């Protein structure tokens, strides 16, 4: 009898260790965030300009991570949703370029889905326009904050929800958008050609430039007014970083495409800085501990939203 008791205690001990290991492994990790940013914003990636071989390498990297986490492909060609993007700001020979959204799905068997997104393109070597450097043509714009930081957050949230050993009340759709810098082209294409019905979306979270936290200002969370449910979702949420909310759903990034389709949105953003759309937006300038805290805050908000019925939409302007 004593031997059986010892045996069951050993099993319980090892199960507890296994459970703890899975929980710890699913936590948002600074080193992984740093790894993603340094890969995407390395000089070898040449700024991930739309249509370039380097942005295609970034797409392969994201696709590989989605596969690693066991996300189901939810594009038109596996994980890929290809579309055409046009460079309008400057005259170049290849003004029409092929771009892609990379889309992975975590199916929890639920009727509704939360979208988590971030754009993975940037300005390349300044030839597609938008550089703030008057002599920027030919210089690599690495886009570590804009928006390797957001993609790193996207990948960590995908990993967390795929590996946290919990079946949530909502499905999760992870989208890395292409051609955002050319005018929200990828997110607009998705919302006009959705790979799941827009009526099945609970809400959308967007990350764009979340790597340069300024404690004097805090993190902006835009879109708080787009659903009456957000006050309840935010109730009791705390963080080791400062954040503030703004009502409007519009705001110069990919959440706007969803807002225009009557879908509640939140857009996380740490604000402008001297390296915005400049060659100096490099990986060593990212505040990685604060980036982790922002992604952890997003996780808390996502989790809270899963306790709500399908969210209503409010037009804020």
Image (cartoon, rainbow, N blue to C red):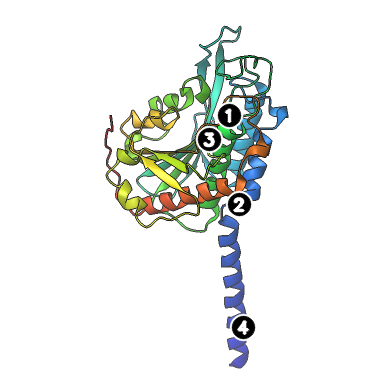
Can see residue 70? no
Disc assigned to residue 7 = 4
Q: Is 236 drawn above or below residue 8 in the view shown?
A: above
Disc assigned to residue 29 = 2
**Alpha-carbon distance for marks 2 and 1?**
27 Å
Q: Earlier in the sequence, mark 4 or mark 3?
A: 4
Please, which residue is most extreme toward the bottom here?
1
Mark 4 or 2: in front is 2
Provide residue 261's location: percent of width, then percent of height: 33, 29
* Circle 4 crowding by C-alpha within 10 Å: few under 14, some 14–19, many from 20: few
Q: Earlier in the sequence, mark 2 or mark 1?
A: 2
The answer to whether 150 appears left or right of 250 in the picture is right
* Circle 2 crowding by C-alpha within 10 Å: few under 14, some 14–19, many from 20: many
Provide residue 314's location: percent of width, then percent of height: 26, 36
Can see residue 154? yes
User: Can you identify the residue that label 3 sits on?
Assistant: 209
Whether the residues at callouts 3 and 1 have beta carbons within 8 Å, the answer is no
Q: Is 171 drawn above or below residue 131 in the view shown?
A: below
Q: Find residue 79 and report its image quarter.
A: top right
Of residues 167 and 266, the one drawn nearer to the viewer in this rendering: 266
Q: Residue at x 44, y 40 (%)?
A: 220
* Circle 1 crowding by C-alpha within 10 Å: few under 14, some 14–19, many from 20: few
Mark 1 or 4: in front is 1
Q: Is 297 drawn above or below residue 188 in the view shown?
A: below
**Alpha-carbon distance for marks 4 and 2?**
35 Å
User: Can you identify the residue that label 1 sits on?
Assistant: 274
* Circle 3 crowding by C-alpha within 10 Å: few under 14, some 14–19, many from 20: many
Q: Residue at x 52, y 58 (%)?
A: 165
């Amino acid at each position: 009898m004593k031997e059986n008791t010892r045996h069951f205690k050993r099993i319980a001990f090892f199960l507890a260790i296994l459970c703890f290991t899975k929980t710890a492994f699913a936590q948002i990790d600074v080193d992984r965030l740093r790894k993603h940013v340094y890969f995407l914003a390395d000089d070898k990636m040449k700024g991930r300009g739309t249509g370039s071989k380097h942005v295609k390498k970034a797409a392969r990297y994201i696709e590989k991570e989605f596969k690693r986490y066991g996300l189901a492909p939810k594009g038109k060609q596996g994980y890929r949703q290809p579309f055409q993007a046009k460079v309008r700001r400057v005259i170049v020979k290849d003004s029409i370029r092929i771009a892609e959204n990379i889309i992975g799905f975590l199916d929890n068997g639920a009727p509704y889905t939360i979208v988590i997104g971030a754009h993975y393109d940037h300005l390349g070597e300044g030839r597609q326009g938008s550089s703030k450097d008057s002599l920027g043509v030919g210089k690599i714009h690495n886009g570590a904050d804009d928006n390797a930081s957001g993609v790193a957050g996207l990948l960590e949230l995908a990993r967390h929800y795929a590996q946290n050993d919990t079946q949530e009340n909502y499905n999760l759709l992870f989208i890395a958008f292409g051609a955002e810098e050319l005018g929200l082209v990828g997110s607009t294409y998705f919302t006009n050609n959705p790979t799941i019905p827009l009526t099945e979306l609970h809400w959308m979270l967007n990350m764009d430039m979340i790597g340069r936290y300024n404690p004097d200002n805090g993190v902006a969370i835009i879109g708080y007014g787009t659903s009456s449910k957000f006050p309840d979702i935010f109730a009791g949420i705390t963080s080791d970083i400062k954040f503030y909310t703004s009502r409007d759903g519009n705001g110069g990034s990919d959440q706007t495409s969803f807002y225009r389709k009557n879908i509640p949105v939140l857009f996380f953003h740490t604000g402008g800085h001297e390296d915005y759309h400049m060659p100096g937006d490099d990986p060593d300038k990212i505040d990685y501990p604060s980036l982790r805290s922002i992604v952890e805050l997003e996780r808390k908000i996502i989790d809270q939203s899963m306790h709500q019925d399908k969210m209503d939409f409010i037009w804020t302007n």
